[in-house]
C-alpha cells in the first residue's frame, strides 16, 4: 500500500563503467545510444534515469540480464557511486555523505536481501539474525529479543538454534529476510531473493513476503527477471533495457498500455485477465447507478469476475472502493473481451 511522498528520488542519474567516466560524461554529446557509448569503451549501467519511489510502495524493477536493474539498486544504496545526476534519500543527497554518514544511513534505514543467502555457517539462526545488531553495538539482551521477534515473524519459531546447513533453501532465505528486518529498515532492497529457489518454495516465499509487507508497509525496491513474480508483487513495475527505464507503471497499465514495442513483446503472452483489476477500467458514472446486483470491488481481478461478467447482462456494472462507496462503472463488454483474450 502506498502511503506518502517520495523516499528515493533519482533525477537524470548515470552510472558509467570505464576509464575516467565522469570526464567522458561531461563531454559526451546528448543522445548517444547505449551501443555508441559501448563503442567508446564505456558501459552505460544506468543511462539518464529519473524515478521516484514512494513511501510504503513496492517498486519491482525487472529486465533481462545486463539491463541495469541490479546496478540501479546498488546506486540507490550507494554501493555504486553515480557518475552524474542527483540521488536523494528522504530529501538528503546521498552523494554528499561522508563514508561514516553513509554507513550510518545504511545501518539505520536500509535493509538488503540478495540472491545468495550470505548466512554465517557457524552461527545459529538466532545469531545470524542478531548479527547486524551486534555490528551496531547493541547489547546482547536487546538484540536477542529483537532477533526472536524476527524469527517468529518469518515463521521459523522453534528453529532458533539450527545452523544454516540444517535448513532448506526456503528456510535459509527466511533467515536472510529476518536478518535484514532486524534493524527495522525504512527502505528494503531485495535483489532476486527467490530466484535460487524451486518453483513451489518460490511461490510460498512470495506469499510470505506479501504477508510481511501487509504487516510492515516497508518502502521496497524488489529486483526480478520473472514477469509473473513482478505482476504478483508490485505496486508499480519499472522495466529496464540497456540501462534505461522503458516504462514504469502499475501492472494493469503495463499490460493494457505498453509504452514501447519492447514492452509490448514483454507482455504479449500475459493473460491480462489475471493482472487487470476492475478499478483499472473505471469509467465515470454517467447518470443514475445501474440497477440490480451488488457493486464490483475495484480491487477484483477480471479473472475473478468471470461468472458475474458472463451472467450479468447490464452494459455497465457499478464499481465500489474498499469502503463500499461507488467510484464509477465498468463496461461489461470491455471486461469480457479481456476475460476472453479478445484484442
Image: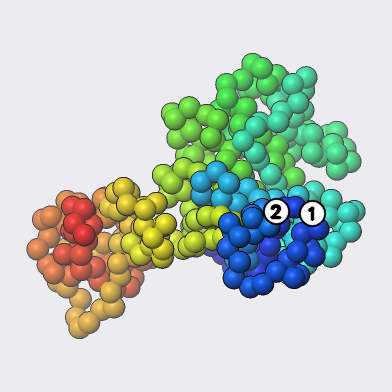
Residue 12 place in picture, x, y as percent:
65, 69
Q: In the shown orientation, is residue 318 left or right of residue 203?
A: left
Rendered image quadrant of residue 300: bottom left
Q: Earlier in the sequence, mark 2 or mark 1?
A: 1
Q: Nearer the viewer, residue 227 or 126?
A: 227
Q: Quadrant of the C terminus?
A: bottom left
Q: In the image, residue 169 lies at what x, y percent?
A: 57, 25
Q: Could one spot residue 287 in this view of the protein?
A: yes
Query: Which residue carries the number 2 mark?
Result: 41
**Left or right relative to 229: residue 213:** right
Residue positioned 20% across, 83% down in the render: 287
Q: Which mark is residue 19?
A: 1
Residue beneath the point at 67% across and 53% down: 43
Percent across and percent down for residue 334 are 20, 64
Q: Quadrant of residue 13?
A: bottom right
Left or right: 115 in relation to 321: right
Q: Nearer the viewer, residue 235 or 47?
A: 47
Model colouring: rainbow
Amino acid at each position: 500500500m502506498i502511503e506518502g511522498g517520495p523516499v528515493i528520488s533519482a533525477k537524470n542519474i548515470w552510472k558509467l563503467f570505464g576509464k575516467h567516466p565522469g570526464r567522458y560524461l561531461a563531454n559526451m554529446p546528448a543522445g548517444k545510444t547505449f551501443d555508441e557509448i559501448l563503442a567508446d569503451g564505456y558501459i552505460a549501467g544506468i543511462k539518464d534515469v529519473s524515478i521516484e519511489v514512494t513511501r510504503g510502495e513496492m517498486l519491482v524493477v525487472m529486465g533481462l540480464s545486463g539491463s541495469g536493474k541490479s546496478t540501479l539498486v546498488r546506486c540507490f544504496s550507494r554501493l555504486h557511486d553515480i557518475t552524474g545526476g542527483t540521488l536523494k534519500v528522504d530529501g538528503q543527497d546521498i552523494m554528499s555523505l561522508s563514508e561514516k554518514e553513509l554507513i550510518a544511513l545504511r545501518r539505520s534505514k536500509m535493509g538488503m536481501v540478495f540472491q545468495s543467502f550470505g548466512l554465517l555457517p557457524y552461527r545459529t539462526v538466532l545469531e545470524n539474525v542478531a548479527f547486524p545488531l551486534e555490528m551496531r553495538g547493541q547489547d546482547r539482551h536487546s538484540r536477542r529479543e529483537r532477533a526472536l521477534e524476527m524469527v517468529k515473524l518469518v515463521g521459523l519459531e522453534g528453529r532458533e538454534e539450527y545452523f544454516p546447513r540444517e535448513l532448506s533453501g526456503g528456510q535459509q532465505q527466511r533467515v536472510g529476510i529476518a536478518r535484514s528486518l532486524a534493524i527495522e529498515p525504512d527502505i528494503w532492497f531485495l535483489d532476486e531473493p527467490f530466484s535460487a529457489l524451486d518453483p513451489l518454495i518460490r511461490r510460498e516465499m512470495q506469499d510470505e513476503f506479501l504477508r510481511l509487507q501487509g504487516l510492515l508497509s516497508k518502502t521496497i525496491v524488489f529486483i526480478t527477471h520473472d514477469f509473473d513474480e513482478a505482476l504478483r508483487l508490485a505496486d508499480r513495475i519499472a522495466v529496464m533495457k540497456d540501462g534505461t527505464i522503458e516504462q514504469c507503471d502499475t501492472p494493469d497499465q503495463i499490460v493494457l498500455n505498453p509504452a514501447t514495442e519492447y514492452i509490448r513483446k514483454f507482455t504479449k503472452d500475459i493473460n491480462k485477465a489475471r493482472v487487470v483489476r476492475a478499478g483499472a477500467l473505471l469509467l465515470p458514472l454517467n447518470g443514475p447507478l445501474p440497477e440490480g446486483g451488488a457493486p464490483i470491488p475495484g480491487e477484483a481481478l477480471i479473472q475473478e469476475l468471470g461468472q458475474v461478467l458472463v451472467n450479468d447482462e447490464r452494459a455497465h456494472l457499478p464499481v465500489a472502493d474498499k469502503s463500499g462507496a461507488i467510484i464509477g462503472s465498468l463496461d461489461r463488454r470491455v471486461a469480457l473481451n479481456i476475460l476472453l483474450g479478445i484484442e
